[in-house]
Amino acid sequence: MGEGNVISVNVSKAKGTKKEPIEFAEVTKNFGINSDSHAGKWHRQVSLLAVESIEKTRKWGLNVNAGDFAENITTKGINLPTLPTGTRIKISDVVLEVTQIGKTCHDKCEIFKKVGKCIMPTEGIFTKVIKGGIIKKGDEILIEKQNF
């Protein structure tokens, strides 16, 4: 399906806040990024958003960067919302499985309030951790082929 790269790894200490970039993340099976507020035993352990989507919002006049949409992994080169649920994504030794495409915008986020729309409901994806390890900026992303 395609390959890409990790542009940024992002975490936050509280839900509902933008995430800050970090050098690398320790990722735990069936939990998520150890230092992130969204980690836990649920279906949205690690979120991904493409830098191409972020660049789209800059055309709306927003000054936004990696992590501003509360995504854990900012990617480049992969059309994330086209990946079906169940798709496996390999980043370094880490294996993620797509569990959800998009999400409901909670209480209309700051971006929605400014421009009347947001990309996370349609372009962000959510995953659970199948195999843990370390993810860092610059890592190659491989999409495992599916037999449908």
Image (cartoon, rainbow, N blue to C red):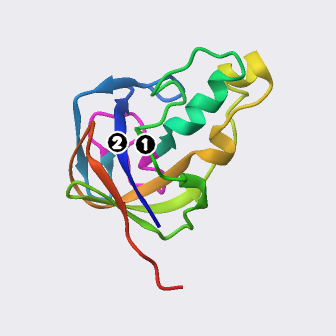
Q: Position of residue 121 (x, y in %)?
A: 68, 43
- Which residue is tagged 1? 75
Q: Position of residue 97 (x, y in %)?
A: 42, 63
Q: Position of residue 41 (x, y in %)?
A: 39, 54
Residue 130 position by quadrant: bottom left
Residue 63 position by quadrant: top right
The reply to whether discs 2 and 1 touch (Cβ–Cβ < 8 Å) is: yes
Q: Residues within 10 Å of mark 1 (few under 14, many from 20)?
A: many
- Which residue is tagged 2? 6
What's the residue at 51%, 61% (across, down)? 99
What stretch of residues is rendered in magenta? 33-47
**In the visual, does 19 lie left or right of 148?**
left
**In the visual, does 39 lie left or right of 123?**
left
Taking 59 as reference, is 138 above or below it?
Answer: below
**In the visual, does 53 lie left or right of 117?**
left
**In the visual, does 68 lie left or right of 115?**
left
Q: Nearer the viewer, residue 78 or 64?
A: 78
Q: Quadrant of the C terminus?
A: bottom right
Mark 2 secondary-structure assignment: strand
Q: Earlier in the sequence, mark 2 or mark 1?
A: 2
Type of amino acid at the residue the image marks with label 2: Val
Q: Residues within 10 Å of mark 2 (few under 14, many from 20)?
A: many
Type of amino acid at the residue the image marks with label 1: Thr
Residue 141 seen in render: yes
